[in-house]
Image (cartoon, rainbow, N blue to C red):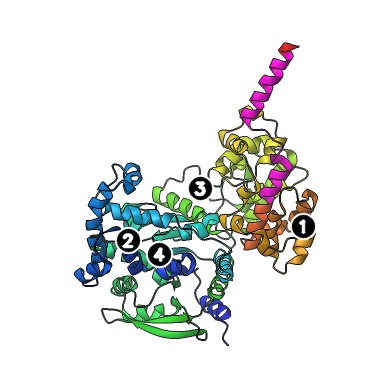
């Protein structure tokens, strides 16, 4: 029997760039049990008097036209029926077309559907594996928000509809392109024949945007049939821009994953003929176990997370676009390096200079001098490591006033309680970003993803302490994920500190384990330092009470 995981991982090594996923309605059917487009329209045809068969026959089986006809008949019902009073009030002033009411109800229906762990063990494993994939982005025609839920920890940037994609500057890293709209914005849905008319008018511009992705990245199709009209249209537009030589290069880059439907797994070369009779070479995978596909996509490790890569690319783009490097960019000689003057370093062949920069910074830390610019450029990874440091490596007053407000603007999850507790700044004088952190009533659930919260304890192998948990799981990452489920009172802080210090070097490389270690550092910071801190408002109330008690005496 062939090994899909190994074959796909080896196949992707031929291409230096990370893949894009192209995800269709079959993906949502698999994990959310959502109907396909035909089924969705049939479901919503129950809101209007005529039968679904009437609309299908009137529209000659053209589903966009079916949607237009249903929307047309639903419009007066939505305005007159008290059942939709709440929707009418909620969307007052936002009903732009005769089709808006149907889009509102479809969007609301999709927004209310989320994935629930514990219903299907195979799907649970697949979703856990999907969260670990190393990709540059996702393209989808789906309207639901399942992908945003899956990749919530990476803060994936979503572009909704053609308009956002065409008039923004995507960076092709950690991005989600919802080319047919999203349920979070009902007007963005490409639903009816009128919508498709507008979509097709702009399609050449969208194809130009997608062309660079198809040429530069492997594209893995999930939840689509090869004959899907949406895929046919996109491939028609893209191949119209390519000669045969470049079309042949797509062979290793276009990968279609299909259900095996009980048959044996397959990994094979195939071809696909577009409606304009262009034959495109593709790679076809057939399997019922998508976990193998997702695991293959996690084999290629990155030094930086997708989120960090996108931030770096965004900042470099801004620098090039504005051509305003004043005070930001300098050409430096490693022999004449003054670290106190440096804010940010990017370079080619800068190993020696980087080593000298680190040495200079360490020297300044030892002497108690690190200038304000230096504190503004402390990386997030150092903040995590500092939670475990003893003695301190930084001036915590400077961290509080200069470093953390800036970092919290891009990552609100950073651990900060140790610095608040051990700095010399009064609670009332803390920067507003730190006050907000103190003002939150935290529980263990705050530090977990939704999927981790949904896991029932009966599904876990719970042990009595951290050492037993680490020893009880063959998978180190899985063991780390289970530690929070020991509960706030079941976690021994000395054991947790020892574990984190023992594996601190793993923080330097972006892996599933490093992500869980960071989560545990945040939990450690809260348990050891945060729970004993009082929010500013509570502290003021206590001071007033103490003052009143003194007056009474």
Left or right of 90 on screen, residue 549: right
Q: Nearer the viewer, residue 500 or 352?
A: 500
Q: Nearer the viewer, mark 1 or mark 2?
A: 2
Q: Residue 326 carries which label?
A: none
Question: Gap in Å between the C-alphas at discs 1 and 4?
Answer: 41 Å
Q: Is the magenta stretch mostly helix, strand or loop?
A: helix
Q: Which of marks 4 and 2 is nearer the N terminus?
A: 2
Q: Nearer the viewer, residue 206 or 484?
A: 484
Q: Which mark is residue 44?
A: 2
Magenta region: 521-550
Q: Which of marks 3 and 1 is in front?
A: 1
Q: Which residue is labeled 3 in the image? A: 329
Question: Gap in Å between the C-alphas at discs 4 and 3?
Answer: 38 Å
Q: Nearer the viewer, residue 471 or 299?
A: 471
Q: What element carries label 3?
A: loop
Question: Gap in Å between the C-alphas at discs 2 and 3?
Answer: 57 Å
Q: Which residue is labeled 1 in the image? A: 466
In the image, residue 31 lies at what x, y percent?
49, 67
Q: Nearer the viewer, mark 2 or mark 3?
A: 2
Single out the residue that lies furthest toward the bottom: 1
Question: Gap in Å between the C-alphas at discs 1 and 2?
Answer: 51 Å
Q: Is-magenta flag for residue 366? A: no
Image quadrant in which you'd find residue 417 = top right
Question: Gap in Å between the C-alphas at discs 4 and 2?
Answer: 22 Å
Q: Which residue is labeled 4 in the image? A: 140
Residue depicted at 37% across the width and 64% down the height? 141
């Amino acid at each position: 029997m062939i090994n899909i995981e190994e074959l796909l991982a080896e196949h992707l090594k031929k291409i230096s760039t990370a893949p894009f996923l192209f995800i269709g309605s079959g993906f949502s059917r698999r994990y959310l049990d959502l109907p396909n487009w035909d089924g969705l329209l049939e479901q919503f045809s129950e809101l209007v008097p005529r039968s679904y068969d009437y609309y299908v026959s009137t529209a000659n089986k053209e589903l966009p036209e079916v949607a237009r006809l249903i929307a047309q008949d639903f419009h007066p019902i939505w305005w007159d029926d008290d059942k939709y009073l709440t929707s009418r009030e909620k969307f007052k002033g936002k009903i732009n077309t005769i089709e808006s009411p149907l889009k509102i109800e479809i969007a609301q229906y999709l927004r209310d559907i989320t994935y629930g762990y514990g219903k299907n063990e195979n799907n649970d494993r697949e979703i856990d594996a999907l969260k670990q994939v190393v990709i540059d982005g996702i393209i989808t025609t789906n309207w639901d928000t399942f992908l945003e839920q899956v990749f919530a920890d990476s803060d994936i940037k979503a572009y909704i509809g053609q308009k956002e994609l065409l008039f923004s500057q995507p960076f092709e890293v950690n991005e989600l392109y919802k080319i047919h709209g999203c349920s979070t914005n009902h007007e963005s849905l490409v639903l009816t024949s009128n919508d498709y008319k507008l979509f097709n008018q702009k399609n050449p511009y969208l194809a130009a945007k997608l062309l660079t992705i198809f040429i530069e990245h492997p594209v893995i199709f999930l939840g689509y049939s090869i004959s899907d009209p949406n895929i046919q249209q996109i491939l028609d537009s893209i191949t119209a821009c390519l000669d045969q030589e470049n079309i042949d290069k797509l062979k290793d880059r276009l990968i279609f994953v299909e259900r095996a439907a009980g048959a044996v797994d397959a990994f094979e070369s195939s071809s696909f003929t577009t409606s304009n009779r262009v034959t495109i070479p593709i790679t076809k995978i057939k399997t019922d176990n998508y976990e193998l596909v997702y695991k293959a996509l996690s084999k290629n490790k990155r030094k930086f997370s997708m989120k960090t890569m996108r931030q770096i690319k965004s900042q470099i783009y801004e620098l090039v676009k504005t051509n305003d490097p004043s005070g930001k960019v300098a050409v430096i000689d490693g022999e004449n390096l003054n670290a106190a003057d440096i804010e940010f370093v990017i370079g080619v062949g800068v190993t020696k200079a980087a080593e000298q920069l680190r040495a200079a910074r360490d020297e300044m830390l030892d002497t108690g001098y690190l200038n304000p610019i230096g504190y503004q450029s402390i990386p997030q990874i150092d903040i995590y490591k500092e939670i475990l440091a003893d003695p301190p490596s930084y001036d915590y007053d400077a961290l509080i006033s200069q470093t953390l407000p800036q970092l919290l603007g891009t990552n609100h999850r950073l651990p900060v309680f140790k610095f608040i507790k051990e700095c010399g700044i009064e609670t009332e004088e803390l920067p507003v970003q730190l006050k907000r952190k103190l003002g939150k009533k935290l529980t263990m659930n705050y530090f977990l993803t939704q999927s981790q919260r949904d896991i029932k304890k009966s599904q876990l192998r719970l042990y009595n302490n951290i050492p037993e948990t680490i020893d009880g799981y063959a998978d180190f990452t899985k063991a780390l994920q289970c530690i929070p489920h020991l509960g706030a009172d079941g976690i021994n802080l000395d054991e947790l500190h020892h574990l984190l210090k023992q594996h601190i070097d793993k923080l330097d490389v972006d892996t599933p384990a490093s992500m869980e270690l960071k989560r545990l550092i945040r939990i450690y910071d809260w348990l050891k330092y945060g729970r004993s801190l009082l929010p500013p408002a509570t502290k003021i109330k206590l001071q007033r009470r103490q003052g009143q008690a003194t007056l009474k005496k």
